[in-house]
Amino acid sequence: MRIERIDLLHVQLPLNEPYQISSGTLAEEHAIIVRLHSGGVVGYGESCPLFAPVYSYETTSTAWYVLTEFLVPALLGQEVDSAESCLRLMDHVRGHNFAKAGPETAWWDLAGKLGSRSLAQMLGGQRSRVESGLALGLEPRIEDLVAKAERLLADGYRRLKIKITYGWDVEPVQALRRALGNIPLMVDANSAYRLEDVEIFRALDDYGLLMIEQPLHYEDLLDHARLQRQIKTPICLDESIHSLRHARDAVELGSCRIVNVKIQRVGGLAVAKAIHDLCHKAGIPLWVGTMPETGVGQAAGLALGSLPGFSYPTDVEPSLRFFRDDLVEPFIEMGRDGAIAVPTTPGIGYEVSEAKLAKYLVEERRFEA
Ligand code: MG
């Protein structure tokens, strides 16, 4: 299809409460919604790096700049008939995967709508429901963490993930095990530790965790391989895997036994699927992680999660868990079984509300071919 028009919409949505991880605190959600127009049909995608460069080097402002100056001009007016050709047109831009994920995922939505196929169908998904996991940030007190976990797990979530950092690791895990028993539990360090901290991870080995996510540096593969050889709990990599190449290297080095795939971090659905295929073949299970993202990005994550290798619960959660409002209609909802239905209607499978886009708009730019 020919890309006739591209719109960029920077939106800002209020969060229910601030969310704290080892590298910073999020107070609100910033996202860039990308609309691709072709033949009277509109495809929606999302670019959502954090507002500050505390998860990756990208921010809302860098994504806006890279989109307006480089990615939109590369795609506008072009015939784009496959995800591969979409990526090829953006390939001269090095890195900036969050920025690329916007038009790339919008292309999948557009192609799905034009061809009357759901994203899950296009990707080769096999599940009709995807299990959801609860993710909790750093809390001021252990009692608050346990109380919040108990209250929210009652909704049906299939596992609990907590953030850890120095001074907030073994103790909260111990408290959760004492209060909640043998629930599926994992921790995410967001690169807070060094290899020299191996004793902390050996101590965590006693608690039967599903995995320890990204314990070491955000670009590291080698030290993770060294750490994995010294502990029993599987290491899951998140920040360190930006591409199919990193996934291949991690598998060969033994840097992890589980991979978290985020569509944003790897630059779209095609690379996410390629990483899935490589890891699944190598016997490495995966799961779909998320950034704080609106329902537009989360809907693509649900479709990805229907692929067979995504065998751990996803971080995709119901719309109202983090936000007071969402851009999609209906909202993303979780059943009592802790699972979310994989959309079956064409494209991302949710309507995107133009009224909500207008309500939360910070800035808009339109580009005509
Ligand atoms: Mg993570």
Image (cartoon, rainbow, N blue to C red):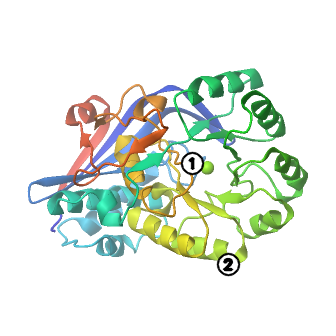
Height in image: 161 above or below 323? below
The quarter of the picture where residue 171 lies is top right
Which is more N-terminal, label 1 or label 2?
1
Front position among marks 2 and 1 = 2
x 78%, y 37%: residue: 173
Front in this rendered view, residue 320 or 194? 320
Amino acid at circle 1: Pro
Give coordinates of residue 316: x percent, y percent. 47, 44
**Quarter occupied by residue 116:** bottom left
Q: Is residue 129 left or right of residue 143?
A: left
Image quadrant occupied by the C terminus = bottom left
Residue at point 43%, 29% (across, down): 320
Left or right position of 236 against 201: left
Marks 2 and 1, Cα distance to the nearest angstrom? 29 Å
Q: Secondary structure at mark 2?
A: helix
Residue at point 64% right, 61% down? 258
**Label 1, residues with CA under 10 Å away: few <14, some 14-19, many ≥20:** some
Residue 198: x and y in percent read 87, 55
- Foreground residue, 353 or 125? 125
Q: Which residue is mark 2?
A: 252
